[in-house]
């Protein structure tokens, strides 16, 4: 028996196949799969491509069980629409589809109750109570929220640089950082970059390492941007602990932005100010979370013997 897990995110789609002993056999990747950003057709194509690449790599035609966690499908209507598109392909004997929040819970907490904070291209906070209730905060997308995400930090840095150029913001080393990262010489080049390319979310989401370097150098503008974004993530965690009535819940972090130690440490310090101390890194990689989710739905007990290849 072979079980596949797919983490279909806003930047890339990651697939892993494990055997019945829990051994990871192969991993593969494809393009972005958030249907709110790339459309349902492209999202499904990315899911299909990642699975086909993984199956081809170990000589399989298909897998027995497939779990998919897909970004941007928080509503039941979105789940149904995605499933309708997926049903045109025979991907596996059994297919279980959910949003990426539930997958992140399995990934970070191995299915146990707690809270997971995701800050990647976008951001969202999910919690699973001791009673099994799933709750969320944030996750409103790039135009309405996503505070603390890669896109948020990058876009706020661009806005600050523009204000600084017009003496509406303090001088900031972000100006040169943004120019270097985007390979531009004049800030007016930002206009076609942003608007003609219909808000290049993934390119903007790659800017945070430079923003965080500026924080490390004491740039006040960068510090304010990062602190504001992190504070919103922390307040979302506080909101869920309030709903659950338990500040002792484990909080795990997830997503590329948290790989930066400075960002992680600031987040940790802010959590402590609200009396929240049980912070940890995820147990597994994101695609393993999709495997565990599928196994839970199928009523299969599976212990992962090696989470990396």
Image: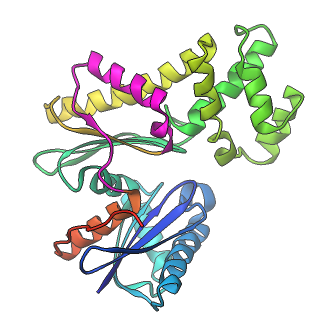
Q: Nearer the viewer, residue 183 or 162?
A: 183
- In which quadrant will I find the N terminus? bottom left
Q: Nearer the viewer, residue 195 or 94?
A: 94
Q: What segment carries the magenta color?
A: 256-284
Q: At x 71% / y 44%, what residue is drawn? A: 199
- Furthest residue in direction left, as rendered: 131
Residue 137 sits in quarter: top left
* Residue 179: % across, % down: 80, 30
Residue 260 magenta: yes
Up-down relation of residue 32 to residue 199 (above or below): below
- In which quadrant will I find the C terminus? bottom left
Q: Nearer the viewer, residue 48 or 82?
A: 48
* Residue 49: % across, % down: 57, 76
Q: At x 44% / y 84%, what residue is drawn? A: 91
- Asked whether residue 143 is in view, the answer is no
* Residue 221: % across, % down: 62, 14
Q: At x 62% / y 13%, what residue is drawn? A: 219
* Residue 180: % across, % down: 79, 32
Q: How many marks?
A: 0
- 25 sits to left or right of 33: left
Up-down relation of residue 34 to residue 157 (above or below): below
- 191 sits to left or right of 57: right
Residue 190 magenta: no
- Asked whether residue 247 is in view, the answer is yes
Residue 170 sits in quarter: top right
């Amino acid at each position: 028996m072979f079980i596949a897990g797919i983490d279909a995110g806003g930047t890339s789609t990651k697939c892993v196949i494990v055997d019945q002993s829990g051994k990871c056999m192969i991993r593969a990747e494809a393009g972005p799969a958030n249907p709110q950003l790339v459309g349902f057709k492209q999202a499904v194509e990315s899911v299909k491509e990642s699975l086909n690449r993984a199956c081809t790599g170990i000589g399989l035609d298909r897998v027995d069980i497939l779990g998919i966690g897909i970004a941007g499908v928080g509503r039941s209507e979105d789940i149904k629409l995605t499933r309708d598109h997926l049903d045109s392909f025979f991907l596996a004997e059994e297919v279980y589809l959910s949003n990426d929040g539930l997958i992140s819970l399995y990934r970070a907490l191995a299915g146990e109750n707690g809270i997971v904070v995701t800050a990647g291209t976008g951001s969202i906070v999910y919690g699973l109570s001791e009673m099994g209730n799933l709750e969320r905060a944030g996750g409103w997308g790039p135009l309405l929220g996503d505070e603390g995400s890669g896109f948020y930090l990058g876009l706020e840095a661009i806005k600050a640089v523009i204000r600084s150029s017009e003496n509406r913001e303090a001088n900031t080393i972000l100006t040169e950082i943004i120019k270097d990262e985007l390979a531009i010489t004049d800030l007016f080049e930002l206009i076609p970059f942003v608007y003609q390319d219909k808000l290049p979310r993934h390119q903007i989401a790659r800017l945070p390492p430079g923003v965080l370097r500026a924080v490390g150098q004491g740039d006040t503008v960068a510090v304010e941007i990062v602190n504001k974004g992190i504070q919103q993530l922390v307040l979302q965690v506080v909101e869920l602990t309030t709903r659950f009535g338990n500040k002792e819940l484990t909080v795990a972090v997830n997503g590329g932005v948290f790989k930066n130690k400075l960002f992680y440490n600031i987040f940790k310090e802010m959590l402590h100010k609200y009396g929240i101390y049980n912070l940890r890194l995820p147990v597994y990689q994101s695609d393993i979370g999709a495997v565990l989710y599928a196994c839970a739905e199928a009523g299969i007990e599976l212990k992962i013997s090696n989470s990396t290849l």
